[in-house]
Image: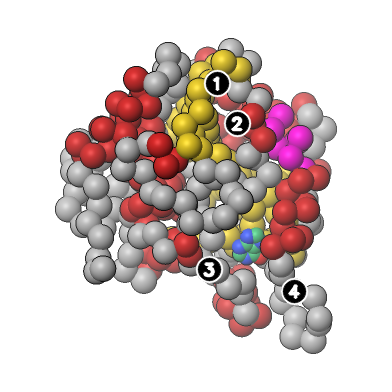
């Protein structure tokens, strides 16, 4: 009990070496599959599958019935590694532990990462089922004094004070916009600002009003720790949210945000999301 200390470089290296010794693939692209994108990992050819509990030093998953595994294989011939299931702060992990797999990817040679999540739509122009390309984030935990980078900095990963403007690569966002146009999905694709709250509660009306005032378009409970750690170690980041519900901003309604709705919407859009990710990965591999 007490505050956990982030893993030193050598511990991350042990996890990376274990995975490298268990696969002949050498991925330079990583994917963190949020709700709706888990199926992408099942599409990989010649895949090697590592349940999280088999990987040295990996966090132990607490969510029952949730796939928790690293899948490494080929997508349209491109080597990728996919996290099928992620670690959330509300499960009890410190932020550095939520993001620890990103450092493992880094030490395995990953240079670009795609991060996805399910989120509530706060922008009144967003509809359920929309895909929001993340342009920027608000790191609420950072405001409150917590960060996955809190503690001693190891320069082998990155600098003490990493910049966070340009966190979401402009080039990758432009590529994704071209792809969704080709897929005739432009009218369901948005771009905006994501905020991570700790959860597991959904938001009160007053909280949502606050977030809207400060420019938030979508609200979720993940992604920011992974992106902060990925940028710290110099990875290029692309991220998107699937808008699974509209945030409820009125007091006099019986409607509530609920996990069932999130899962249902994710299921309906999963083909489109997988196709977008797949086409983007093919383009990312040639730049
Ligand atoms: N709020 C926070 N996280 C979420 C939501 C939401 O409305 N929908 C899906 N994840």
Q: CA distance from mark 1 to mark 4?
A: 40 Å
Q: Quadrant of ligand 1?
A: bottom right
Q: Nearer the viewer, residue 212 or 225?
A: 225
Query: Label 2: how many residues lie within 10 Å, few (<14), some (14-19) or many (20+)?
Result: many
Left or right of residue 158: residue 63: right
Q: Nearer the viewer, residue 177 or 256?
A: 256
Report whether residue 230 is seen: no
CB atoms of marks 1 and 4 within 8 Å = no
SS at circle 2: helix
Which of the numbered marks, if any, corresponds to residue 199? 3
Q: Is residue 28 magenta?
A: no
User: Which of the two discs, 1 and 4, labels the residue nearer the N terminus?
Assistant: 1
Query: Label 4: how many residues lie within 10 Å, few (<14), some (14-19) or many (20+)?
Result: few
Residue 284 pos. (x, y %): 54, 23
User: Which of the two discs, 2 and 3, labels the residue nearer the N terminus?
Assistant: 2
SS at circle 3: loop
- Kindly report which numbered mark, 4 or 2, lies closer to the viewer in this rendering: 2
Left or right of residue 285: residue 227: left
What stretch of residues is rendered in magenta?
269-275
- Kindly report which numbered mark, 1 or 4, lies closer to the viewer in this rendering: 1
Q: CA distance from mark 4 to mark 3?
A: 15 Å
CB atoms of marks 3 and 1 within 8 Å = no
User: Which of the two discs, 2 and 1, labels the residue nearer the N terminus?
Assistant: 2
Which of the numbered marks, if any, corresponds to residue 41? 2
């Amino acid at each position: 009990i007490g505050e956990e200390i982030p893993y030193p470089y050598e511990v991350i290296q042990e996890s990376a070496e274990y995975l490298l010794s268990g696969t002949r693939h050498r991925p330079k692209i990583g994917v963190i599959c949020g709700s709706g994108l888990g199926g992408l990992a099942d599409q990989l050819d010649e895949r090697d599958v590592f349940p999280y509990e088999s990987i040295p030093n990996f966090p132990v998953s607490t969510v029952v019935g949730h796939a928790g595994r690293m899948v490494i294989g080929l997508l349209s011939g491109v080597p990728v590694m996919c996290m099928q299931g992620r670690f959330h702060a509300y499960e009890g992990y410190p932020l550095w532990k939520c993001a620890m797999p990103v450092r493992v990817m880094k030490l395995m040679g990953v240079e670009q990462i795609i991060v996805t999540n399910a989120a509530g739509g706060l922008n009144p122009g967003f509809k359920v089922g929309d895909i929001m390309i993340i342009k920027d984030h608000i790191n609420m935990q950072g405001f409150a004094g917590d960060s996955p980078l809190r503690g001693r900095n190891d320069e082998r990963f990155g600098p003490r004070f990493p910049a966070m403007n340009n966190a979401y690569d402009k080039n990758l966002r432009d590529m994704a916009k071209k792809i969704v146009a080709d897929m005739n999905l432009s009218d369901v694709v948005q771009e905006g600002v994501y905020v991570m709250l700790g959860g597991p509660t959904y938001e009160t009306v007053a909280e949502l009003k606050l977030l809207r005032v400060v420019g938030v378009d979508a609200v979720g409970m993940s992604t920011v720790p992974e992106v902060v750690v990925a940028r710290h170690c110099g990875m290029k980041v692309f991220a998107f949210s699937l808008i699974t519900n509209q945030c409820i901003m009125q007091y006099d309604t019986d409607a509530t945000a609920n996990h069932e709705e999130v899962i249902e919407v994710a299921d309906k859009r999963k083909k489109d999301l997988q196709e977008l990710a797949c086409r983007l990965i093919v383009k990312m591999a040639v730049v």
